[in-house]
Image (cartoon, grey):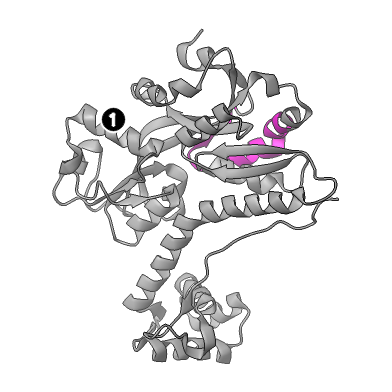
Amino acid sequence: MTYNFRIGLRPHWTLEGADGEAPGDGLSLQELLAMLAAIDATGHIAGACKACGLSYRHGWGVLRRFEALFGTALIVTRRRQGTQLSPFAERLLWANRRIAARLMPTLDSLASELQEELERLQTQARPHLRLHASHGFAVEALMQHWGQREPALELRYRTAVEALASLERGDCDLAGFQIPLGEFERGIYANYAQWLHDDEHLLIHLAVRSTGLFAVAGNPKQVLGVADLARPDIRFVNRQPGSSTRFLVHLMLQRAGIAADAVQGFQTNEFTHMAIAAHIASGMADTGVGVETAARRFGLDFIPLVQERYFFAIRKSALESPAMQEFLRFLRSAGFLRCVAELVGYDARETGQIQTVREAFFGA
């Protein structure tokens, strides 16, 4: 028996009073946030109500109710110019987008863990592969398209170092990590070397992705490269301590002769590429480093810096197992290859290929 559903977890806003009591008996903001997003997209209330499946009267009621609770306008309507969000509503909507971008990988990881815990309670639990991986859009696509296939694929998002350490301990079957091509490869590889052994491990190629600087649409501050991070008018947002992207930023600054404390915002942290993009798109920073896919999804400009290879490390002894062979068949399938190739900034030409550690990093 396998479950015919997949568990999902999503962030949810509620509004509480100053005394801790929730006005209106635990008032949810989800309907309001959906309305605001639809107004932002359509430019008028009628279109927003239709998009949300609400009557015009009910949609107006939602807006008026929350305007009364917040004590400020949520929309601005101008004759012949449609309806726009007020500055307060814009900030509220961007906060929701940042929270979703920051939390979704963690929630997806927890949902996968819960799904597997429930399935293991069955008398005949299905076989599974344990995937610990640094977050990436190709990994997201893998999980979305894997569905209910056998074996079950159990995901935990970890930093690259944490994922590789998990493989070493036997806590996972696949460890996902990224490494830049070119001059920064050796520096990043040194972070991984103690967990990658040519006689024990093989690498499955997932994709090559483009990583660079994000900038507000139109790049009004003319952020052109790493040297601009030292400018006093540039606010930077970084990835969290322990992440490979943060270490890559450190190496780039070192090469440019820039001290970390000379970068305004170096200690401001976000946990995903999407959260970096949302942080910048909402006006809280001018630039940050991430994958091109995230920049494009938030309408940001992208300044390429490096190409990164993303690998899954496995134990050599696991390669011929039925579960791993099924995993490889899926990676090499036309449908999945097309899915990865459609991600902006991703290259799927080598997806599913297997290399030794020596072949991947030492050309032998």
Residue 328 among those drawn in magenta: yes
- Give the side of residue 341 with respect to residue 180, left or right: right
Secondary element under disc 1, as helix, strand or loop, is helix
Q: Residue at x 57, y 89 (%)?
A: 58
Closest to the observer, 71 or 3: 3
Q: Which residues are magenta?
A: 327-350
Determine crowd level at label 1: few under 14, some 14-19, many 20+ residues with C-alpha closer than 10 A: some
Q: Residue 333: horizontal and vertical position, in percent?
A: 72, 33
Pointer 1 residue: 251
Residue 312 among those drawn in magenta: no
Which residue type does callout 1 highlight? Leu
- Give the side of residue 15 with respect to residue 186, left or right: right
Q: Is residue 360 above or below residue 69?
A: above
Q: Residue at x 39, y 83 (%)?
A: 75
Q: Residue furthest top?
A: 364
Q: Residue 215: horizontal and vertical position, in percent?
A: 31, 50
Q: Residue at x 60, y 79 (%)?
A: 50
